[in-house]
Amino acid sequence: MENNFNHRPRLYRFGRFFLVLITLAAFATAASGCGGGGGGSAASSTVITTPGTNPGLSFTSPASATQMSDVDFRAETFYIEIKHTAALRSGSLVVNFSMDGGTPTNIASYFSEYNSTTLRTNSQFYNFTRSLFDLATNDSTRRMTVNASANSSDGGSGSATPLYFEVLPAAAPPPPLSP
């Protein structure tokens, strides 16, 4: 009488191979977008992305809620500084500046890399600050708001807590003229 026990390992190996083959076919079908659609030129696909490193952004100068004179604000030594915790993708920095709640202006072009983790306004920023208001006739406290956002080189995104500071007239406004 023949022993059928010796054929069992071969049958077992064939079953495992068949199971692996069916599993691979199922994955290939799912990955190729099976499910009909009838062909056509409009293709839809699902892209799975892994989120990148979110760059931490923070304003380090001036300190938020700072008050400074309009003379100091318009000085060549005034700058805005942003620290970041991840490599930033080139061209992704957006820094919006607004005065007194007005329309924001993107001032990212005024920022240069100061060191590997710091961006600082460059010398052209001086011309921008001088264009905002006339120093001789400034008699109002100005509220400045700065927002920043950027993408990291690997696709993450981040934004800084907004920076607010006030620019005060250097001298008190003159009293009203008497009639």
Image (spheres, grey):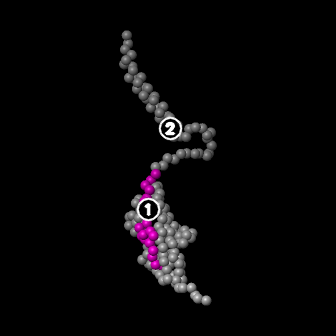
Rendered image: mark on residue 99: none
> Residue 123 at x, y = what percent?
45, 75
Mark sitting earlier along the chain (1/2): 2
Q: Is residue 59 magenta?
A: yes
Q: Give the position of the N terminus as an image quadrant.
A: top left
Q: Amino acid at mark 1?
A: Leu
User: Which residue sits at x=50%, y=71%?
Assistant: 144
Q: Is residue 36 magenta?
A: no
User: Which residue sits at x=39%, y=19%?
Assistant: 7
User: Which residue sits at x=61%, y=40%?
Assistant: 37
> Which secondary structure lies at badge 2?
helix
Instruction: Choose between 178 and 37: the one closer to the eye.
Output: 178
Which marked residue is nearer to the observer: mark 1 or mark 2? 1
- In the picture shown, does residue 62 fall above or below 38? below
User: Which residue sits at x=49%, y=80%?
Assistant: 169
Give the extent of the magenta segment. Answer: 51-70
- In the picture shown, does residue 65 fall above or below 49? below
Q: Is residue 153 visible?
A: no
Q: Which residue is outermost to the bottom?
A: 179
Q: Amino acid at mark 2?
A: Ala
Rendered image: mark on residue 57: 1
- Residue 87 is drawn in which quadrant? bottom left
Instruction: Choose between 106 and 170: the one closer to the eye.
Output: 170
Q: Is residue 92 visible?
A: yes
> Residue 52 at x, y = what percent?
44, 53
Q: Which residue is mark 2?
A: 28
Residue 179 placement, left or right of 19: right
Q: Which residue is outermost to the front?
A: 179
> Which secondary structure lies at badge 1?
strand
- In the picture shown, does residue 87 fall above or below 137? above
